[in-house]
């Protein structure tokens, strides 16, 4: 950082803060350091009765702490873990939690208050000064260290034997590669996992509330229905991972209100199915305004217009929600006509 | 009598013998000689760092207790514990064991709540402590390294907190983890790989609780413990800074000795902090995961908020417009990736300031006397601008809450954050600088004209004046003890022979910054002895 152009130190204040060191008022300088003020005695320093009072206060605080600890143990034994009591103004709280916390808090606080009171009233409060010493070593020490280092390096011969030095550096540089390689099995490669969900042609739409397949007449205008693919069961081990991609949001809009042509084509009689997973960072979208057909993600407030291809109308999401193409099968149930045509959820590098 | 003294000569008291034993092996006497009566200055603002240390200790103590009962597993189980509303619900073992800690382990709920409250206080105390160090210039040489240690502790503390509150695998924290996974996906080129490796496959998979667990209880706290010990060793080694005042110089440290006063006060303060947090945990419930339920990737609750210290990145992600660039079959998710990058940049802006400042001043001396914030207007203004930015982002992170409680439009708040992100720090900077300069003028007046006594005097010719009382010397010294830098000058770039001297662009920038920091109008010249004498001898006031 130093430079030849600008002379260092010239712009620094000419006198350091300790120019008046010595602590004696210089008659000529009204701003000079008058030195440490004279110690003013406290009441406890001059009145033994006051000191006794302080002593009793400290002892009382320590005693209170002991009592509180006994109270803690007693509460632990007395209160059942599930006892709920009404305490103003907290309302209904766990009696055990309240009693344990208060007694522990008092036991701790009184030790602290006692120690601090002791220090403030009875221990010496005379301020004393300690000298500081510069952190940096003296030039002699520095010279000695540099010489020692040079001697050591010289004796090792590291400078004279580059073959040893270079191979050693190579070995040390390569070794961490093992640590990197061994991390490989932390997880599988992405491949096209993020591009597919459980949805496929012919899969029925299961209502998440009733766990029954949905019929078109179950979906009323103004309602919001959550659905998942047939064959997905809460008890299967990868349920969480599957539902994280396959979760579906179904609404019914008057076909003439649907502004997007593809949306209309992929719908059935005004019933449209969209991915429930927000395209921002993957929160499930769950707030639906039935008059405007807007849905809002409660996490970061991205807002989508379900009557217009679920395009983003506000918030941080970058693209529309993917739509699932649906139809009705021979038995009159709603079914998927394939998987989502684009990846659901947050965008990623390979999404394209 | 004589036998007693003989005994004493032969055999030292038990405590001394133990100390002798230890000294022969550890050299404790030399250590104690240097430190037992070490002087610590007394000031309330020096306790802020202690709150950090003590809450960290409380977190470790309660955290160890929690590990005895917590099961870091994502295996699905059906709940059959004593919390009736959750019975029969499918949940991960992690969530079920957190319910057990809360409802079946006696005192478990208290320890859980102390742990969580202490974590919130820990991070808050670190920020406030950092602000104290920043605004008083305590980061200057020789303490720059310790400043960085402290900053790293703050960042690690945030991530330890995040991994910690994600462990119960409840609906709220799972949503937070999902957010993090979405943010990781936005990283160009390697995002999907990072996500797969972190979660052991697709989100949420069955691994992240166990992985976060080892990160939360071992990896991060281990690093933090090391940094913390180094931080404290350096505090001891550098000796504490002190405020200017009578008898206090750059070459001494004025205060009271470690044994007994500081030990009693600081030791006592640990119990005070622990006691207060215990009472808070007794009366204020925190993170009631039983009300939220277990995590399901397709479920969410409204008003989803992270712990407060994650509100700042949350604000970034909420306010950012959803920019996405699709080119050559790839997607650049700027709407998420830019906030991800801004997060460390905004935080780090405060961390690099000490190095910028020391580069501009070129000051290589040690500084142990603290600045009053007003006397360093540019630094203070920068610090306040940083805090203002932080607060704007916190508002952004809670935009739904603000909209709800203050009946505001969420869109309006988001737009406020988008504009405020750029505008508010600038306004805060300018306003703070003006306030600092005003306060400097006031100090100058006080030194030159004395203290306003509130006594109104009527002069013989009818004029009313307020009597000013000259300050005592100690006060005069305190108000004039600060140093004032002069702006650096590049000087003429052409010498007397007309030969042009080359000046590096960085030096020009440095001179410009220096002018902005210290030129006339950017600090008020402190009163000189001559000015003081002239006014005081002029038998009057004004």
Image (cartoon, grey):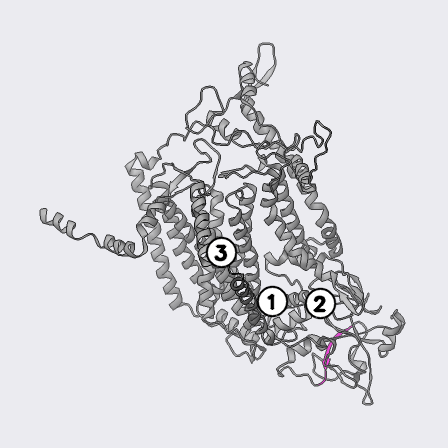
Whether tag 1 and tag 3 are in contact, CB under 8 A, the answer is: no
Which residue is labeled 1 in the image? B173
In terms of secondary structure, where does tag 1 sit? Answer: helix
Residue at point 38% right, 30% down? A38
Same chain for mark 3 and mark 2? The answer is: yes
In terms of secondary structure, where does tag 3 sit? Answer: helix
- Dot placed on the residue nearer the N-terminal end, 2 or 1: 1
Count of number-bearing discs: 3
Residue at point 38% right, 52% down? A110
Magenta stretch contains residue A226: yes
Query: Which chain is mark 2 on?
Result: B
Q: Is residue A284 above or below residue B221?
A: below
Mark 3, residues whose alpha carbon is within 10 Å: few (<14), some, or many (≥20)? Answer: some
Which residue is labeled 3 in the image? B227
Q: Please, which residue is most extreme toward the top here?
A: B461
Which residue is labeled 2 in the image? B189
- Dot placed on the residue nearer the N-terminal end, 3 or 2: 2
Query: Which chain is mark 1 on?
Result: B
* First to last magenta residue range: A223-230
**Nearer the viewer's eye, disc 3 or disc 2?**
2
Query: In the visual, does B145 lie left or right of B329?
Result: left
Q: Is residue B498 above or below residue B364?
A: above
């Amino acid at each position: 950082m130093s430079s030849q152009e600008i002379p260092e130190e010239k712009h620094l204040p000419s006198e350091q803060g300790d120019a008046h060191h010595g602590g004696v008022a210089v008659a000529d300088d009204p701003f000079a350091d008058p030195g440490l003020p004279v110690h003013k005695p406290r009441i406890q320093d001059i009145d033994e009765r006051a000191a006794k009072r302080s002593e009793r206060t400290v002892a009382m605080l320590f005693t209170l702490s002991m009592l509180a600890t006994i109270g803690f143990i007693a509460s632990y034994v007395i209160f059942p873990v599930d006892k709920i009591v009404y305490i103003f103004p907290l309302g209904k709280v766990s009696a055990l939690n309240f009693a344990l916390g208060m007694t522990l808090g008092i036991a701790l606080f009184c030790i602290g208050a006692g120690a601090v009171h002791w220090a403030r009233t009875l221990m010496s409060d005379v301020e004393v000064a300690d000298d500081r010493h510069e952190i940096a070593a003296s030039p002699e020490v520095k010279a000695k260290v540099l010489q020692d280092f040079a001697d050591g390096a010289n004796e090792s011969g590291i400078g004279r034997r580059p073959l040893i030095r270079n191979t050693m550096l190579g070995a040390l540089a390569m070794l961490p590669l093992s640590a990197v390689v061994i991390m490989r099995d932390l997880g599988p490669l992405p491949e096209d996992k993020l591009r597919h969900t459980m949805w496929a042609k012919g899969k029925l739409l299961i209502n998440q509330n009733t766990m029954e397949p949905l019929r078109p007449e179950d979906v009323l205008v103004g309602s919001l229905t959550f659905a998942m693919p047939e064959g997905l069961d809460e008890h299967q081990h990868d349920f969480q991972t599957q539902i994280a991609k396959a979760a579906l949001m179904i609404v019914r809009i008057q076909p003439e209100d649907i502004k997007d042509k593809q949306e209309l084509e992929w719908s059935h009689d005004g019933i449209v199915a969209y991915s429930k997973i927000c395209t921002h960072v993957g929160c499930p979208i769950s707030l639906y305004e039935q008059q405007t057909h807007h849905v809002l993600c409660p996490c970061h407030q991205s807002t989508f217009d379900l009557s217009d291809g679920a395009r983003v109308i506000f918030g941080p999401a970058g693209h529309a929600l993917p739509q699932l193409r649906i139809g009705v099968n021979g038995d009159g149930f709603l079914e998927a006509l394939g998987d989502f045509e684009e990846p659901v959820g947050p965008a990623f590098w390979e999404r394209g | 009598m004589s036998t007693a003294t003989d005994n004493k000569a032969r055999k030292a008291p038990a405590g001394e013998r133990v100390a002798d034993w230890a000294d022969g092996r550890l050299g404790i006497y030399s250590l104690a000689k240097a430190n037992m009566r070490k002087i610590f200055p007394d000031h309330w603002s020096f306790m802020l760092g202690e709150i950090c240390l003590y809450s960290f200790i409380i977190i470790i103590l309660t955290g160890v207790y929690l590990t005895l009962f917590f099961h870091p597993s994502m295996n699905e189980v059906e709940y059959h514990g004593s919390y009736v509303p959750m019975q029969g619900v499918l949940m991960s073992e992690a969530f079920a064991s957190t319910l057990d800690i809360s409802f079946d382990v006696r005192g478990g709920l208290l320890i859980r709540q102390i742990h969580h409250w202490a974590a919130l206080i820990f991070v808050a105390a670190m920020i406030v402590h950092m602000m104290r160090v920043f605004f008083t210039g305590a980061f200057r040489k020789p303490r720059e390294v310790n400043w960085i240690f402290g900053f790293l502790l703050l960042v690690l503390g945030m991530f330890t907190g995040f991994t910690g509150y994600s462990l119960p695998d409840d609906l709220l924290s799972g949503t937070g983890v999902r957010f993090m996974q979405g943010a990781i996906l936005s990283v160009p080129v390697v995002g999907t790989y990072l996500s797969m490796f972190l979660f052991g496959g697709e989100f949420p998979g069955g691994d992240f609780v166990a992985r976060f667990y080892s990160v939360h209880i071992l990896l991060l706290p281990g690093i933090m413990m090391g940094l913390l010990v180094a931080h404290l060793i350096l505090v001891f080694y550098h000796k504490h800074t002190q405020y200017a005042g009578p008898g206090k110089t750059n070459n001494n440290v004025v205060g009271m000795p470690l044994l007994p006063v500081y030990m009693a006060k600081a030791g006592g303060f640990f119990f005070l902090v622990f006691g207060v947090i215990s009472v808070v945990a007794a009366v204020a419930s925190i993170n009631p995961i039983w009300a939220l339920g277990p995590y399901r990737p397709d479920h969410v609750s409204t008003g989803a908020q992270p712990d407060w210290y994650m509100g700042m990145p949350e604000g970034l992600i909420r306010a950012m417009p959803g920019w996405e660039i699709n080119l050559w079959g790839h997607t650049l998710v700027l709407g998420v990736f830019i906030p991800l990058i801004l997060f460390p940049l905004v935080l780090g802006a405060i961390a690099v300031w000490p190095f910028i400042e020391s580069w501009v001043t070129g000051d290589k001396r040690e500084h142990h006397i603290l600045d009053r914030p007003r006397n360093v207007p540019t630094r203070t203004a920068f610090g306040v601008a940083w805090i203002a930015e932080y607060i704007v982002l916190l508002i952004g992170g809670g935009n739904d809450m603000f909209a709800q409680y203050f009946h505001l439009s969420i869109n309006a708040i988001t737009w406020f954050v988008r504009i405020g992100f750029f505008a508010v720090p600038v306004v805060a900077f300018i306003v703070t600088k003006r306030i600092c300069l005003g306060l400097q003028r006031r100090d100058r007046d006080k030194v030159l004209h004395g203290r306003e006594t509130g006594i109104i005097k009527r002069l013989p010719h009818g004029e009313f004046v307020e009597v000013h009382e000259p300050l005592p010397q100690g006060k005069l010294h305190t108000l004039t003890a600060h140093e004032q830098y002069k702006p650096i000058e590049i000087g003429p770039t052409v010498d007397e022979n007309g030969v042009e001297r080359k000046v590096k662009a960085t030096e020009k920038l440095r001179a410009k910054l220096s002018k902005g920091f210290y030129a006339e109008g950017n600090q008020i010249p402190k009163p000189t002895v001559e000015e003081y004498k002239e006014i005081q001898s002029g038998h009057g006031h004004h």
